[in-house]
Amino acid sequence: MTETEFQAMRQAVVDGDADAAEAAARASIAAGIPPLVAIDEGFMPGMKEVGAGFAAGDLFLPDMMLAARAMQRALAVLEPELKAASVERTVAGRVVIGTVAGDIHEIGKNLVGMLLSTSGFEVHDLGVNVAPERFVEAAREHRADIVGLSALLTTTMTGQRAVIAALTEAGMRPPVKVMVGGAPVTGAWAEEIGADGYSEDAMGAVELAKRLVGGGATGAGAEGPAR
Amino acid sequence: MTEPRTTPEAPAAPPAAPPATPRWDRLGPATAARLEEAALEILERTGVEIPVPEALDLLRTAGAAVDGSRVRIPERLVTRALEAAPKEVALHDRAGRPAIALAGNAAFFGPGSDCLNILDHRTGERRRATSADLREGLALADALPNIDFVMSMFLPADVDQTLADRHQAAAMLALTRKPIVLVTYELAGMLDALEMAELVAGGREALAERPQVAVYINVTRGLLCNEDAVRKLLVCAERGVPALWIPVTSGGTTGPITLAGTIAVNTAGILAGVVLSQLAREGAPLVVPGFGGDSLDLRTMVDPYCGPEPKGVAASLAHRWGLPMFSLGGGSDSKAVDGQAAAEASLTMLADALAGGHLIHDSGYLESGLTGSLAQLVVCDEIAGWIRALLRPVDTSDGALALDLVDQLGVDGSFLETDHTLERYRERWYPALFDRRGFEPWRAAGATTLAERAAVRVDELLGRHAPTPLDPDVEKAIRAVVDRAEATAGL
């Protein structure tokens, strides 16, 4: 029976059907499937499928958002069960993300945050026009593995360097990794300011984040697709 | 457009110019009225954010409801402002001669501004643009016969990025005699750029009377006016410098995903700018967007430059108000000077021209505005020439109809050798870049593609065209403005 139930969970997420996801979550509890297993074997594969479809250019951002909503609804049912059983979900990593000071562009940053969340990262989005000190505080508060810095303008991307300096000054580097992104940002820029990596697009940012928390990062130039 | 009428008993007048080619009105009166009504409702109900005390004072005094920095603007203020705003803005060349009049069905073409990258036509490499690219692009735009106005094209990476706008303004004023659209960062950048333009024009009054420049004001989004944008608008209104008030609302992110919803929000922001500019000074020259209503591409997350569905919508509204406009055609989402780039540039330039889009910018843009290409600019110049010929009214004068000649040659005569042909064959459009040769001559000449011929033409034009230099004293004074900005910034 379990395969059928996993299939229903996966399909509910793929279809972006929150009602079906909630029903599947309840059914899994009734069937005695451990909640962690339901998440990892049932719902997450659905998210991965949708993420892959988006990365391939077959699906649209709203498909991702609907899938994430369905996932959230299932988690709302399963998380109390996890708590009751004193089980903690392992996260892929903790990420603090924001658009640097002086810059109010948020769409790219929001997209990266959303894709990271749906890929199993715990994401703390600080919003736009974020001062360097705020990044430092939040990274400390949330025990961040990664700080993600967005900038759309050539005039504001220097703010990424300022945040890295503030993190260094606070003694948080190199354990806290920094990834940078935004239209004017390049691998060369990431290297120049001492970031751990950059990605040209949001899907690449997820891959980069996975590599960074996996500890395999070796210098900015190696990260992200060649240009 | 209706044909000018003459009464039957009127004395024979000199032959009138043929009537203008009718304009494509995308919306029609009923749809335009509904969109305008929606925008007015947004202005009254939701309001706009205008975070500048002087602007709020003007609006409050005029009767708008001001709550903090949120302003709700009643319809009567909009109606009055639309009446007061000039229905024609004329841009001039460097010598102060009228060059392009933004009014009626006019369509003028020019490049865009601030591309981060250049697709180098010599190496094929996509790389960061430099000051040398900026200068070459401007010299080329100055040389191209169908490019009517100039924008910076490139954001040079080899100057301090906070002052790149000063370098762009100085280069534009030095390298072209054509009208210029200035794009600057903060208010201070605009003031420096205007100071440079005044040096060329011969003073502030001369610039206002015969402006070579118009100022592009980028507004954050329809209902959110950033402080610099508002301050720039107030300064331009006060000085009589043409201002382009350009809010950009993106469907699905900063506005509703639907075309009508995004247009309504953006139009509210446009009208707020019209009101503010006319309150600052009645009759202040203002140019509104002839584009808008695009949505972020939700598959690639790229901001597309050539989606079909918004084309002509904002232009219909601007024509409804009779206001000069700044349109967006000639750009492409392609990464190469290829078939997609040529098709997208052609379609968007043609749509904007048919819609009477006045200042149509972004020729030469690739990669959704991130990369500029001089070869693509040359392709756009060719397209612009084609469109100009398309829009030319049909001459039905006696000389053009040549009925006597038709009768004289009868049913089987040859027209090739006649004086009529020899005198008039040049009235037909001939390409400079599109290839019309037969197959063998084309192959013998290297079997080139459009992109290859365009790259060659870039260097031909740059090789033989030297922009007319500025008076050395003026050039020196402009340099001093840039130096002063650098000194102020501590560079």
Image (cartoon, coloured by chain):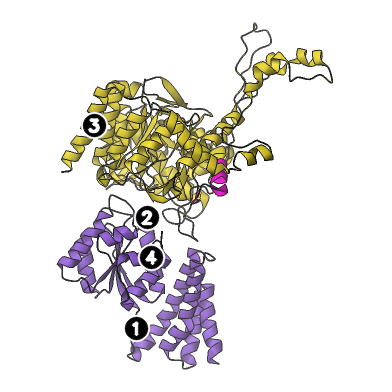
Chain colours: A purple, B yellow
Disc number at residue A224?
4
What secondary structure is found at the residue carrying circle 4?
loop
Indicate whether residue B335 is drawn in magenta. Answer: yes
Q: Which mark is residue B479?
A: 3
User: Is label 2 on the same chain as label 4?
Assistant: yes
What is the distance, in whole Å, between disc 2 and disc 1 at their CAs? 33 Å
Q: Quadrant of residue B277?
A: top left
Image position, residue B254 (x, y; %): 41, 54
Depth order, front residue of B124/B96: B124
Q: Which label lies toward us, 2 or 1?
A: 2
Query: In the structure shown, which secondary structural element does the residue marked by tag 1 occupy?
Result: loop
- Element type at marker 3? helix
Task: Say which residue appears at 61% left-offset and 19% top-offset.
Answer: B4
Alpha-carbon neighbours of circle 2 within 10 Å: few (<14), some, or many (≥20)? some
Q: Is residue A77 left or right of residue B207?
A: right
Crowd around label 1: few <14 · some 14–19 · many ≥20 (10 Å):
few
Q: Mark 2 belongs to which subunit? A: A
Distance from disc 1 to disc 3, alpha carbons, whole Å, reads: 60 Å
Disc 3: which chain? B
Residue A131 visible to an observer of this rendering: no
**Kind of residue at disc 4:** Gly
Q: How many numbered circles does the render carry?
A: 4
Q: Which residue is mark 2?
A: A183
Which residue position holds label 1?
A90
Which sits in the foreground, B15 or B463? B463
In contact (CB < 8 Å): disc 2 and disc 4: no
Q: First in sequence: mark 2 or mark 1?
A: 1
Instruction: Report the mark closest to the observer, 4 or 1.
Output: 4
Find the magenta span and give its range.
B332-348
